Amino acid sequence: GLNLHLLQQKYLSYVPIFGRALLEMGTQKEDFVSLSQHISCKTGGIKTGQFASSIMDVKDATAWMLLRGKVTMERTPDLLEILSDILLNAEFDNRQRFKQILLQEKAKQEQKIIPSGHLIVNSRIRAHLNESDWIMEKMTGLSYFFFLRELEKKIDSDWGSVLTCLQEMWAILLNRS
């Protein structure tokens, strides 16, 4: 898990797409196609997810981006090797690939709006009540959908600033100190 409380607020909406980029853009050792094949061949899959929760009697919530992988016991070293490569050697500079990931993510979010409208409204209301719900709304709610729409425009007009955000997030979240 990567502690999201290390990030500034401006990065929160980037978290889900950043997680996908870690897994789907490739590394210094493998391009995105060979990385995907490597993951499929050696594991039962690797996914990212976000988690935020209030803590009883504590002001701040806890917030994490989680990487989850499935393997048999014999394949555990393979999973750990892949996760190490993804976390330590991530490459974010493929603009076209990032835009593909973004468009898929935006389409997924659009498909959720009508059938899950009541959940979206609930999320927006709860975001005003506590930090953990506010964080989740920024990463999965309507705010996230609006963020994706703006990010699509920004990729075309100012790719350098998008790339800088991804690289800064990577440096912050994977800082040993």
Image (spheres, helix red, strand yellow):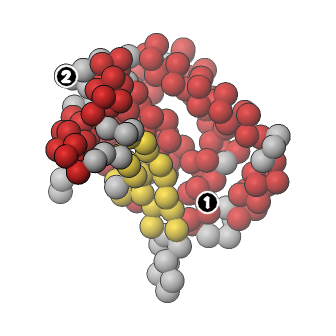
Mark drawn on residue 134: 1
State the SS at label 2. loop
Residue at the spot x=21%, y=23% of the render?
28
Residue drawn at point x = 67 percent, y = 28 percent: 107
Which residue does the image show at 47% across and 49% down from the upper left?
A: 49
Residue type marked 2: Lys
Q: Name the residue type under label 1.
A: Trp
Q: Is 6 placed above or below 171 here?
A: below
Q: Where is residue 88 in the image (x, y as percent from the top left)?
A: 21, 37
Q: Where is residue 155 in the image (x, y as percent from the top left)?
A: 52, 20
Give the residue drawn at x 49%, y 58%. Answer: 51
Q: Position of residue 30 (x, y in %)?
A: 24, 20
Q: Mark 2 points at which residue?
A: 29
Depth check, mark 1 against mark 2: the one in front is: 2
Q: In this view, does 13 lie to the left or right of 82?
A: right
Earlier along the polypeptide chain: callout 1 or callout 2?
2
Asked if one can make out residue 23 in the rendered structure from this viewpoint, the answer is yes
Q: Which residue extends farthest bottom?
A: 57
For the N terminus, the image quarter is bottom left
Rendered location of residue 153, percent (x, y) = 60, 20
Residue 33 appears in which quarter of the rendering?
A: top left
In the displayed structure, does residue 156 sit left or right of residue 164? right
Q: Nearer the viewer, residue 143 or 29?
A: 29
Q: In this view, does 176 lie above or below 102?
A: below
Residue closest to the eye, 48 or 63: 48
Pointer 2: residues within 10 angstroms few (<14), some, or many (20+)? Answer: few
Could you tell me how far apart the alpha carbons at marks 1 and 2 are, in whole angstroms?
37 Å
